Amino acid sequence: MRLDQRTIAGLDLAGKRDAIFFDEDLIGFGLRLRASGDRVRKSWVAQYRSKGRTRRVLIGSVDKVALAEARKAARTILAKAELGDDPQDAKAQVRRENARSVRPAIDAYLEARCRELRPGSFRIAKLYLTGRYFRSLHPLAVSAVTRADVAAAVRAIVNKHSATTAAAARRQISAFFGWTIAEGLLGNGANPVDGSFCPDGPAARDRVLSDDELVAVWRACSDEDFGKIVRLLILLGGRRQEVGGMRWSELNLDAGIWVLPAERAKNGRAHTVALPPMALNIIRSTPASARDQLFGDRAGVGFSNWTKCKHRLDQRLGAVKPWKLHDIRRSVATGMADAGVAPHAIEQILNHQSGHKRGPAGIYNRSSYEREVRAALALWADHIRALVEGSERKVLAFPA
């Protein structure tokens, strides 16, 4: 029969509980009648075969979808099936994606990443993703989040906090959606963060402390943990978290080396640092305790009281322009370059995987430039010694 208003009105179940009446013009388009209590429910369906199985897609209720609209929808579904697609699978996939909301997916993401990220990086990711920053996205399905949703959330962070905070939060949510794509949770969708509103992050810092400022910082350091850490930063050009978390088990004082393990290095690469005598003297002046960490009083963390101690140091410094601890690292690199140290040796000291070791060069060139690095650190330590003591330069020999 041809399904039209007249034939539809005359259809009934004839004692059955469920029956489908197919249209003779559009093969696969039908009207399904089902008994439900004391009434009969009528729905439009499209039926086809895919991969040897009979598949059926519900188009909608007769009460809500007109015949012409149902026929048009059925034609689209059947055309896709004829071309090799499976509309029922696609519909089921959409339902599965809509069932995956952002908040549970974030928990799964953090669980997966906790084994890969350093503890500090993991805490930051968890703070931005599970806290109030993206709470508006939490109840949404992962696949339903749009670029506009992300932009609105990021703008709200700018208004309530700062552009710097918003830029950092945006990087975290972008990494999360990148993970959902890799895990197949976003279907064929694109990362909704891409192309969305991106606030200006902090301007790249270019602060380099002069020799006089380095001397002032050195002399203002007390003999407490923070002062020792700052002086080691000046001598070694290390990162504050790596030096602040230094462990006795990482040190070979007889050989004069510090081996930073991969799990504590920012770039995930183990790093061996030759310790000049001035650095060795600072380390040896630190009393050993039951903890493996040299500095701080929190087991497993190392030094953590950065803000208060930096504030007290600045108060003792007085006239020195505002600076950050990370500026020391830039100052060391700049000072070494001015002293004639080769760029590849400076990068090795800083544990940077860039420049001469970027890309294929880094794959084939595995040299640690040990002699050049030792000489550079000795030269720099002698420079600092001469500045602090106000004496002539005299490069000190490393212990054998």
Image (spheres, rainbow, N blue to C red):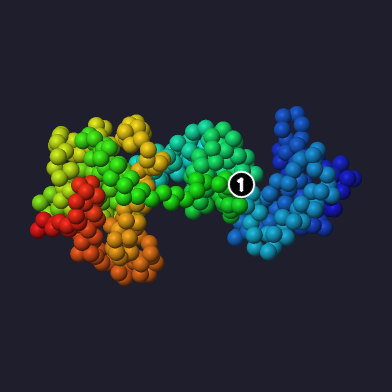
Viewport quadrant of the C terminus: bottom left
Q: Secondary structure at mark 1?
A: loop
- Please state the horizontal and vertical placement of residue 277, each as a whole percent of the image: 15, 51
- Please state the horizontal and vertical placement of residue 107, each as a whole percent of the image: 45, 39
Q: In the image, what residue occupies the spot 84% across and 53% down?
A: 1
In the image: residue 190, left or right of residue 361? right
In the image: residue 164, left or right of residue 32? left
Q: Nearer the viewer, residue 53 or 82?
A: 82
- Please state the horizontal and vertical placement of residue 116, each as a whole percent of the image: 36, 48
* Residue ranking furthest to the top: 38
Residue 68: tell me if it is visible.
yes
Q: Which residue is mark 1?
A: 197
Q: Nearer the viewer, residue 197 or 322?
A: 322
Give the number of marks.
1
Q: In the image, what residue occupies the spot 29% across and 63% down?
A: 341
Q: In the image, what residue occupies the spot 28% across and 57% down?
A: 349
Q: In the image, what residue occupies the spot 55% across and 47% down?
A: 200
308 above or below 46? above
In the image: residue 106, left or right of residue 36? left
Which quadrant of the view contains residue 99? Answer: top right
- Please state the horizontal and vertical placement of residue 396, each as a whole percent of the image: 15, 56
* Residue ranking furthest to the right: 6
Q: Nearer the viewer, residue 367 or 278?
A: 278
53 above or below 128? below
Residue 139: tell me if it is visible.
no
Question: What amino acid is found at the position of numbered circle 1 in the picture?
Answer: Phe
Neighbour tally class for label 1: few under 14, some 14-19, many 20 plus, Cα within 10 Å: some
